Image (cartoon, rainbow, N blue to C red):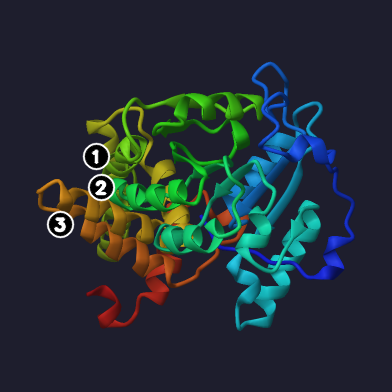
Amino acid sequence: MLSYIRVGAAFKAQPVLRAPRDLMSLRAASRPWLMATSPISSGSIAFIGFGEAARAFLDGWRSEAGFGARVSAYDIKTDSPDAETRAGKRADYAEANVIGVSSAPEAVAGAEAVFSVVTADQAEVAAQAALSGVAKGAFVFDCNSCAPQTKSCIAEEAEAAGARYVDAAVMAPVHPRLHKTPLLISGPHAKDALSVLAALGMAAKIEEGPVGSSSSVKMIRSIVMKGLEALVCECVLAGRKAGVIETVLDSLDDTYPGFDWKKRSAYMLERVMTHGPRRAAEMREVARTVELLGLDNAMSAATVGWQRRVGDLRLRAAKEETADYRLLADLILTHLDKPEQLR
């Protein structure tokens, strides 16, 4: 996932459901913002980053009866030197009908819940930028794919700012389940946070332990999930160049019946093409996790290479091509034509 956002004043005029001011005070203990018995919040939510995950959560919340939260966001893509990138992100805000602001502190000001959904390499920078404006007692849901040690550092900064930090691991793709995508949460505020997420209709479970516990699950799971994508890239591309890939995948289907290697290979190739840079950033955190556990992280480090290499090509296949691993492999191979790209 995964960037920050700002939308200019021209978009602030978009109609947004706003909560009464007395519902936006965390100090009003007799009037808690989110109640597990209510279907959804009518308070104030902020996003730091407004990419695929943020939009999926928002679309899901809005499918719930009675959703009426004020939603603000900041994304760094509107600070891009590229005019088309800036305009595209502002258009995303207008389409989503959210309040875009010019800085992270402005986005989180007055919000009772902050969802950080940026790329793994930007998580700590994003947190540091936002925490200067966070409300005392606000929940900060760090949904970024970071090493447990990274989450622990961010948690210390968040707690020092008076926020309630929650380590949140997103355990599956956000499509098609949107806000129902499984989350693992951990840390000292996990129990209270569970009620907040339940009121938003989200599917969260507590991973017992300190901050970093749920991220440990996510990081170690990614050794297989993102590593398998990298293995498929190397296998399919090599097999396609050698002219033997169909036989290879048929053989794998014999060994692992029911997996459907041809269908899965197409899916994995498309995912790496589309999300490779974000996955590479996550896998750097995975490699760090493994290293800090005192183990050789060679597999995770190699996964970084394939995810980055293919993702950096910025290739996009036509919708009708995404189900055919051969077409995707040929598209990638056409652009992997420089020897240095294969090293």
State the residue lying farthest toward the top.
Answer: 37
| Above or below: residue 342 compared with residue 216 | below
Residue 206, placed above or below residue 5: above
Q: Position of residue 342 (x, y in %)?
A: 26, 74
Quadrant position of the C terminus in the picture: bottom left
Q: Is residue 136 shown left or right of residue 59?
A: left
Which residue: 10% across, 48% down? Answer: 295
Q: Residue at x 23, y 49 (%)?
A: 289
Give the residue pinned by disc 3.
298
Secondary structure state at the residue bearing disc 2: helix
Q: Which mark is residue 248?
A: 2
Residue 211, horizontal then vertical, whole percent: 35, 38
Q: Position of residue 187 (x, y in %)?
A: 39, 34
Mark 1 touches mark 2? (CB < 8 Å): yes
- Nearer to the camera, 59 or 136: 136
Q: Amino acid at mark 1?
A: Ser
Q: Which numbered dot is residue 114? A: none
Q: Residues within 10 Å of mark 3 (few under 14, many from 20)?
A: few
Residue 320 visible to an observer of this rendering: yes
> Which of disc 3 and disc 1 is earlier in sequence?
1
Residue wearing tag 1 = 251
